Amino acid sequence: MSKKVKTIEGALCAPIGFKAGAIACGIKNPAVQRLDLALVYSEFPTVGSAVYTQNEVRAAPVRLSASYLKSSEPRAIIANSGNANACTGPDGLINARAMSAATARALGLKQREIQVCSTGIIGVPLPIERIEPRIPELAASLGHDSDAAARAIMTSDTCPKSVAVSLKIGGKEIRIGAIAKGAGMINPHMATMLCFVTTDAAVTKAEIVAATRDAVDRSFNRITVDGDMSTNDTVVVMANGKAGNKVVTRGGEGSAEFREALGEVMLELAKRIVADGERVTKLVEVRVCGAASNLDAERVARAVANSKLVKCSWNGNDPNWGRILHAVGYSGARVKEEMVNIHLNGVMATQNGIAAPTDIAKLGEAVRGPEFTVCIDLNIGKGCFSIYTSDISPEYVDFNRSEYSVVASKST
Amino acid sequence: MSKKVKTIEGALCAPIGFKAGAIACGIKNPAVQRLDLALVYSEFPTVGSAVYTQNEVRAAPVRLSASYLKSSEPRAIIANSGNANACTGPDGLINARAMSAATARALGLKQREIQVCSTGIIGVPLPIERIEPRIPELAASLGHDSDAAARAIMTSDTCPKSVAVSLKIGGKEIRIGAIAKGAGMINPHMATMLCFVTTDAAVTKAEIVAATRDAVDRSFNRITVDGDMSTNDTVVVMANGKAGNKVVTRGGEGSAEFREALGEVMLELAKRIVADGERVTKLVEVRVCGAASNLDAERVARAVANSKLVKCSWNGNDPNWGRILHAVGYSGARVKEEMVNIHLNGVMATQNGIAAPTDIAKLGEAVRGPEFTVCIDLNIGKGCFSIYTSDISPEYVDFNRSEYSVVASKST
């Protein structure tokens, strides 16, 4: 975090006027009662914005929420884990609508003021009969602690993810809080990833929309775990203006500070999502510079960050710069092999496209820790890009080859 | 194989006038004497063509061979395993030239008549001192059995790969023989893959160039194991005309038959390469039809064939069509979710974008075998494409995370 923002307690409920709650409905398995239905609520009107998955196959709740946001500001978010309500046809939409209708009734809101999110298994009908009757109880659980909500949206996450910061805008203290879930299928352009953000900052609609897009581009669109992209990804931001600051307009006074803070909140959660990826042991930042363009730098960063062979080598503490260089080569970017330098956590591995005169043990040390950087300098231009990624472990494959069968046989 | 071609014995040496040989030089490890240096030789002048990796980072032997082919027809191929001579800088080129010079001397050819290939670890200097003095012995090993050569180019392959066919062109019997190696890093647009093809067909230079490109597009460019692309891929075809058929010109009489046979030879080897991919247990053909264009069909096929999550599920005999559909969704192709049908080995898994009314046990059965098809019909156009891929296993990751360290410490 930069010096301008201060990390504070309270997560989603740190900003004035927001409440959160959660209950256990047995969505994945009626026999196992774990928190799986979350609610976030603003006591006051908001301006809001959202970014949804770019997957052409979009889950029913994503399609519904996107249509609601076109004609209304959001006041509440209901989210379930254990079932993605994706690839579920017309019944999927009916069930997502039932969730929003019941939530609107319980909170005295309009249906289109509700954002609906689901995460979990694809292609299995949502057990709406276990969800809908419990929504009044969910509303009754609303309070000033968002930890239960952060837990209720977890799927294969091993820990809840939340953060809150405060900063001064025009002399007034404003707060931003957020929770997120990730784990499998974390990819650039978002993944099975949900992130809900609350703020009491006073901002215009245009500013919240631009700031959200900006922050997502600098955070969730720069992480990758397994190169897949989910049907359900959603980031929702609600701002209720209760901090009493002078309203921040698009690009106006306070906008830079607000956007930087929102970006830092999302980047912090994005990094935690990668580090908590399924059976991941390392968080790796791939930084590319010296490319012919920023787009070329992005191509190189994504090729390296998504290379299965590179990710395997990191899992084995193996400083295999040859695999990195060959991914650079097939990235589609303009590359002069004999100009490329690669540093692993600050230690030179590759100089002018060949092995640097560095002791192999020292290189091994550079990639041994749970967090390191890979800096790739193409030395032909000024294009830069960086991305966060992880290793891939045998346990990841083992975990992902058995999940569906087990779940499907239990929940269908 | 189609009815027009007949599988025959003899591999590379089945066509008239070709010889092959191999010796053990201890390139990877002087203490382990396994076959690691291969030679293929045409006793007569040829017309030849080659396709090299599209990786921007090209191994020294690839750069050298490509430059030789611009000014000469090939008469011989020398290939080593155990070291890729890639990312080895100016010394890499010097060493590749030394290989071609010694081979030319031993065979009484010009240096530019030699194609040089290397496969193995990247970024480690080629131990030319173990190779160069042995080349006369390699030349002396030439004979009419190409099995040793097929073995000598293996890296993590578990078995040698060779094939030969005969067919009639204009009433004359012609023969095509080939050997290949693959295993890790098998990808569309080629991979750590070498394939050497000999034929005694009489064809023009223009025809051999076009036929080679065509056959590669229909075979090696349609396989994928781990989505990476190597620095060393090479396909070399040599035709010496000794069958005495009327010369086949580009697109002229006999061209269709010749190209079909060449394509079948390469496709057979390509499929064996996928099936023998590192720790692979399944060979899967992904067929896409009904796309808005052939390019869209290709996008879908590649997205599904390269999805780590899809490949994990196959490893667990898991008919997880939801993961397939979500890969379809992020492929970049035009997709109407509610139109998509998916069949697993002929069993309907997805109908109109949702679960088909098929028993889960029957679907599980469909993906249990060592070979099955995944047919994806987008139902919006006439675009088609198919690709061969594999599952991914925990053992693949385990294998690839340790290889480099072990090899590097042994060979440097």
Image (cartoon, coloured by chain):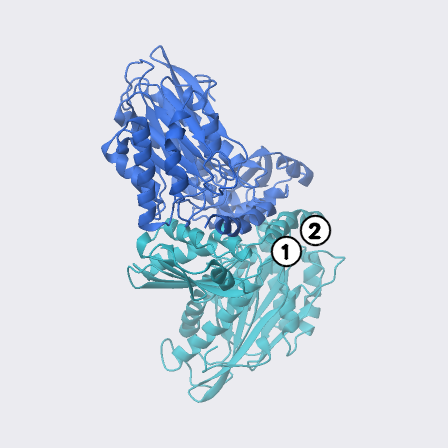
Chain colours: A cyan, B blue
Amino acid at the residue labelled 2: Ser
Amino acid at the residue labelled 1: Asn
Q: Which residue is mark 1?
A: A83
Q: Are marks 1 and 2 on the same chain?
A: yes
Q: In this view of the protein, can residue B285 be seen by the observer? A: no
Query: Residue B97's spot in the image, x, y percent?
Result: 30, 40
**Which residue ends up furthest to the left in the rendered image?**
B71
Q: Between residue B326 and residue B35, name the one nearer to us.
A: B35
Q: Between residue B294 and residue A245, name the one nearer to us.
A: B294
Q: In this view of the protein, can residue A302 be seen by the observer? A: yes
Q: Compute the Cα span from label 1 to label 2.
A: 9 Å
Q: Which residue is mark 2?
A: A411
**Which residue ends up furthest to the bottom in the rendered image?**
A171
Residue A108 found in image quarter: bottom right
Q: Between residue B256 and residue A103, name the one nearer to us.
A: B256
* Residue at mark 1: chain: A
Query: Residue B2's spot in the image, x, y percent?
Result: 46, 20
Tell me whether the residue at label 1 lies in contact with that at label 2, contact meaning CB atoms closer than 8 angstroms: yes
Q: In the shown orientation, is residue A198 left or right of residue B239?
A: right
The local crowd at label 1, few if under 14, some if 14 to 19, many if 20 or more residues have their Cα within 10 Å, is many
Q: Residue at (70%, 51%) from the top-left corner?
A: A411
**Which residue ends up furthest to the top in the rendered image?**
B171
The local crowd at label 2, few if under 14, some if 14 to 19, many if 20 or more residues have their Cα within 10 Å, is some
Query: Residue B234's spot in the image, x, y percent?
Result: 38, 37
Query: Residue A54's spot in the image, x, y percent?
Result: 46, 56
Q: In the shown orientation, is residue A174 left or right of residue B18?
A: right
Q: Is residue B93 above or below residue B384?
A: below
Residue B19 found in image quarter: top left
